[in-house]
Amino acid sequence: MAEIVNLRQARKQKKRAGDKERAAENRALHGLTKTEKAMEKDRRDAEARRLEGHRRTPEDGSPDQ
């Protein structure tokens, strides 16, 4: 005899498998290691400090004297 299959459950299982596969692909494409994240944060912070150092007036708007 053939095994009875609940089509609703089969569709959900198929969707979950596809979602897992898509998530793995996205992690490979967009994921960064902890070290890479730290390096990127340091780079952004250094760029912000450099930009702030070139301002003509402080951020609060008062003259710099």
Image: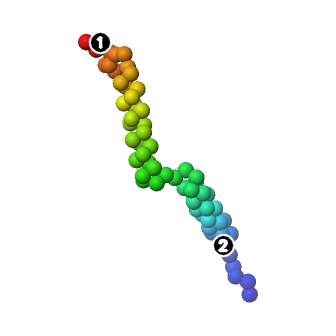
Task: Judge from the rendering whether residue 43 lies leftward or rightward of residue 11; answer left or right.
Answer: left
Vertical order, 31 against 21 (above or below): above
Vertical order, 20 against 34 (above or below): below
Where residue 32 appears, as percent x and y from the top left, is 49, 52
Figure quadrant of the N terminus: bottom right
> Mark 2 sits on what residue?
6
For label 1, the crowd category at 10 Å Cα-Cα, with few meaning under 14, some 14 to 19 and many 20 or more, is few
Q: Nearer the viewer, residue 48 or 1?
A: 48
Where residue 12 appears, as percent x and y from the top left, is 62, 65
Q: Residue at x 41, y 42 (%)?
A: 41
Residue sitting farthest toward the right: 1
Q: Nearer the viewer, residue 49 or 19?
A: 49
Residue sitting farthest toward the left: 65
The reply to whether residue 62 is visible in this rendering is: yes
Q: Residue at x 42, y 39 (%)?
A: 43
Q: Residue at x 68, y 69 (%)?
A: 7
Label for residue 63? 1
* SS for dot 2: loop
Tell me the amino acid under the disc marked 2: Asn
Vertical order, 41 against 15 (above or below): above
Residue 45 picture quarter: top left
CB contact under 8 Å: marks 1 and 2: no
Tell me the amino acid under the disc marked 1: Pro
Residue 61 picture quarter: top left
Give the foreground label among 1 and 2. Answer: 1
Where residue 38 appears, as percent x and y from the top left, is 40, 47
* SS for dot 1: loop
For label 2, the crowd category at 10 Å Cα-Cα, with few meaning under 14, some 14 to 19 and many 20 or more, is few
Q: Residue at x 57, y 60 (%)?
A: 24
